[in-house]
Image: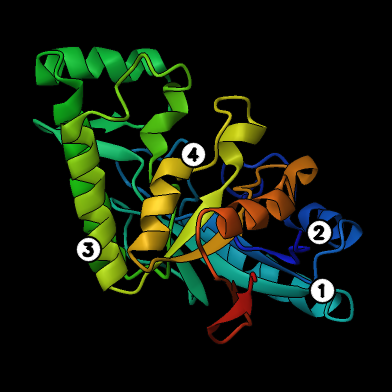
Amino acid sequence: MMKIFQNLHTHTVFCDGKNSAEEMILSAVSHGLNSIGFSGHALTDHDRSYCMNEEKTFAYYDTLLKLREKYSDKIKVYIGLEQDYFSVKPLIPVEYLIGSVHYVLKNGEYIPVDETKEITLNAVERLYGGDIYGYLEDYFELVGNVFQKTGCDIVGHFDLPEKFNGDGKMFDRESPRYVKAYEKAMKKLVSESRIFEINTGGISRGYTNSPYPNETILKKLAAYGGKITVSSDSHDVGTIDYRLDEMSELAKNCGFGELYFFDGIKFKTLNLK
C-alpha cells in the first residue's frame, strides 16, 4: 500500500473548517505528510454561510504566505481554493483550483446538494415534481461544465449526491438516466484532461461507506483513461490524512496505474504498480 504524502483538499476556520491553518499544518507534519494544500471555499454570493467573504479571503492568503515561510523546513504549503460552479472569480492568486458543484439552480432557486437529505428531497418534490433523476441530470450537467466555468485543475467530489444515498433508497445508482448523466459528465472532463479526486470526506463524516466517486464510477473512470488524486476533504486536524493510503490501493484495484500530485508548479505522477 502506497504511503500518501499530500492532501490538497483542506478547510480551516476561514470558511467551514474547525481548526486554524497552523493547526492543520502541524497535524499534517505529525501525520508524515510532506505537503499540504489549502482549498478554502471561494466566495459564493448567494450563500455566504460556509464560504470566505472578501475580508476572510485576503486574510486567508496573507496567513498562508506567512505560515508557508514559518514551516518551510518541515512541510510545503500550497495555496488553492475550492471554486464552486457559482462562486465569484478568485479574489487572490492561487496555485491550483478544485472545481465543485454544491448547488443546482432550478427556477431561480439554488438547491444545496449536500446540506441535508430532507432539503434535497423537498426541493425535488417542489421543483421537479418528485423526479429525482431530473435533479441528478441537472447536477451532472453542471459538473460536466465545471472546468469551463471555473478553470479548475481538480474535479471535487464528482458524485456528491451520494452523500445521502448510503442505503441506495434516495435513487438507484444503476438507473439508466443516472448512469447516462454521470458518464456524459465524466467523458467530457476526461477529454479536458481534468484530475478527479478520490475524496474520503463523506466517509469520515459518517455519511457514506464509499469515497467520492464510488468504486463503480472509479472503474469506469479508469477505463476511460481518467486521471486521479486522493484527498480527505479535511475540515479538522483529525482527518488530515483520513484513509488516503487505502484510497491508493482502491485506485490500483480499480485499474489506475498512476496517481497525480502537485509539486507547487505543476501536477506530476506517481506509479501505482
Q: Earlier in the sequence, mark 2 or mark 3?
A: 2
Measuring from the top left, give residue 75's x and y in whole percent: 82, 73
- Please, what is the three-letter code of the amino acid marked with disc 3? Lys
**Residue lying at 68% horizontally and 68% vertically, measured from the top left:** 64
CA gap, disc 2 and disc 1? 8 Å
Which one is closest to the eye, mark 2 or mark 4?
A: 2
Q: Earlier in the sequence, mark 3 or mark 4?
A: 4
**Residue lying at 53% horizontally and 85% vertically, measured from the top left:** 266
- Please, what is the three-letter code of the amino acid marked with disc 1? Ile
- Please, what is the three-letter code of the amino acid marked with disc 2? Ala
User: Which label number is shown at residue 50?
Assistant: 4
Do the residues under discs 2 and 1 have CB atoms within 8 angstroms? yes
Residue carrying label 1: 75
User: Which label number is shown at residue 188?
Assistant: 3
Do the residues under discs 4 and 1 have CB atoms within 8 angstroms? no
Which one is closest to the eye, mark 3 or mark 4?
A: 3
User: Which label number is shown at residue 30?
Assistant: none
Q: Earlier in the sequence, mark 2 or mark 4?
A: 2
Report the residue that reaches farthest toward the bottom: 265
Do the residues under discs 3 and 4 have CB atoms within 8 angstroms? no
CA gap, disc 2 and disc 3? 34 Å
